[in-house]
Amino acid sequence: MQEKWVVAAKRADFRAIAEKYGIDPVIARLIRNRDVTEDEAIRRYLYGTIDDLYDPSLMKDLDRAAHLLIQAVNEKKKIRIIGDYDIDGIMSSYILITALQRLGADADVRIPERIKDGYGLNENLVRQAAEDGIEWILTCDNGIAAAEQIALAGSLGLRTIVTDHHEIPFSEEDGVRQEILPPAEAVVDPHQSSCGYPFKDLCGAGVAYKLVWHMLELAKVPDRAELLQKLLAFAAIATVGDVMDLKDENRILVREGLKEIHRTDNLGLNELILQSGLEREQVDVYHIGFVLGPCLNASGRLDTASRALAMLMAKDRGEAAQLAGDLVALNASRKDMTARGEEEAIALVENSPLKDDRVLVVYLPDCHESLAGIIAGRLKEHFFRPAFVLTRTEEGVKGSGRSIEAYSMYEELCKCRELFTKFGGHPMAAGLSLPEENVEEFRRQINACCSLTEEEMIPKITIDVPVPVSYIREDLIRQIDLLKPFGKGNSRPLFAERGMEVRYLKVLGRKRNVAKMMLVSQDGCRMDAVYFGDADSFAAYAGSRGSIDIVYYPGIDTWQGRNRLQVTISAYR
């Protein structure tokens, strides 16, 4: 696929920043490239701690929600938490039930089943709560779009509190937007236009964490600091797993949460880490996103997310080990099914008129509906276009979409809302349901109103700064570590150098997906390097040319107690 290389050109007095904070000017440039500019923001970025998190009570309705819940606990009211079946919903549910139990609440959790219930609060869950004598419903990672269901709950005598982080549904007339809020006792979602909370991009578990923080403070729970510290691990897992931007408050939550994961005493989480072949102290953003997270999500995709929640709440190591093993096995099955679905979807696009669409709408009737989002994500990566994958279910057609930065998926769906029985989501991802007869019309309309340009559909590699490999030193790499955790919204720093000669190249790995080599720069500097990907294609390309340009990030390769500088090549031409 064609790629466009660009160098970040953001300006600042890098030398002054470097001197003020005792860092290399290259590090100062990296910070500026991540749009961190003011002195206080730079300090928080480099050294922020839990003390730098925002006051929860700044979030609209959060103080009211906390007081209502404490009153409900004191009055022995029955509370039901209703979460979601993905990693964010699981972690949100765990955070809320743990805090409510610590307060002595009569509380339980119901997580909808993806196939039977669909996403979020539905009529069946509301009626079941009424039959079970529940008096309060507390949603997490859902509820903002459940106005009808919450109205039904009210008519049945149930009171509802919504905690969510999704975009607020709206209607639009004459170019004026009107937010549609559910008729709950309190609606806690920082995306409300009337919410003055300084940071809008918390995940559902981040919102839940802020609520329990305030509740525990109001109730003056003696060990609240210790409990909140431990719960950071689960807010961090959700933030990474739900692919939130690692900026501002999220970055602190994840950085501090990783420390808690490294010493967690949660039996279920420890067993999942162990059975995934990881060391607890080594878990980082990558392992959450690509090892642990998929196992947690697999429970909600192929079975029930209640299994993952039960694992986290297990009080016996044997039970925790069995449940963790189940999740690992489910994820292995999910991988196989996903690979087959991805292959089918790519072939369908490449061998049909779909390949000419700017927005891909791929109908795979026999695909397991829980895999639609993953396959949509793979299509987006393969073709670098927004992609929806739809599948047939008993209730009609359901689907998931994944987007590119230039395309706000939720807003585009709003333009053809009359085609759907249900939809919701973010700028980068969405879910929808529609009658089967509307599938082709959806494809037509979503493409007709698409304004993406050819330029916006070319993947762009943003180079932080051209840095010769001769400049790479161990102390510079140690300073780069101050910028961690890396992930969406806080990308790993990328450097570049032209005219690198490749020597002593070896292709390794059972799948021949690793190339190790030595690079020699034009000024004669030698540097060990590694490339992960199609190593044979890389070797053929490098071998046919006297030199190549590379985009890379530096690191330290430790082998038998010895450290060696090494760069990892992420792109070449």
Image (cartoon, rainbow, N blue to C red):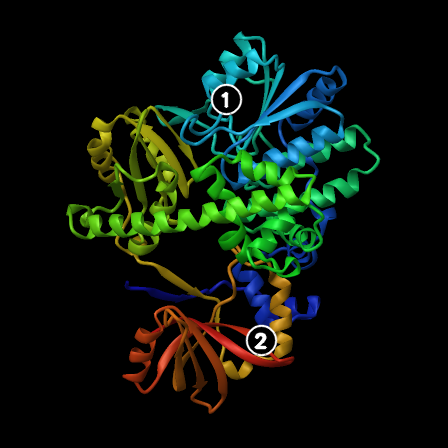
Q: Is residue 409 above or below residue 555?
A: above
Splitting the image into 4 quarters, where does residue 211 fall? top right
- 77 sits left or right of 275 in the view: right
Q: Nearer the viewer, residue 303 or 32?
A: 303
Helix, strand or loop at mark 2? strand
Q: Specify whether residue 572 is in view.
A: yes
- At label 1, the amino acid type is Leu
Percent position (x, y) of residue 1?
Answer: 28, 63
Q: Is residue 185 above or below residue 4?
A: above
Helix, strand or loop at mark 1? loop
Splitting the image into 4 quarters, where does residue 317 fall? top right
Q: Residue at x 63, y 36 (%)?
A: 94
Circle 2 is placed at which residue position? 556
The residues bearing labels 2 and 1 have C-alpha atoms spaced at a distance of 51 Å
Circle 1 is placed at which residue position? 181
Mark linked to residue 400? none
Tag in front: 2 or 1: 2
Percent position (x, y) of residue 89?
Answer: 54, 36
User: How dense is the environment of label 1, judged by Cα within 10 Å: few (below 14), some, or many (20 and up)?
Assistant: some
Q: Residue at x 55, y 52 (%)?
A: 288
Q: Nearer the viewer, residue 138 or 269?
A: 269
Splitting the image into 4 quarters, where does residue 163 fall? top right
- At label 2, the amino acid type is Ile
Q: Is residue 208 above or below residue 454?
A: above
Quarter the C terminus occupies: bottom left
Q: Residue at x 62, y 78 (%)?
A: 474
Percent position (x, y) of residue 383?
Answer: 28, 54
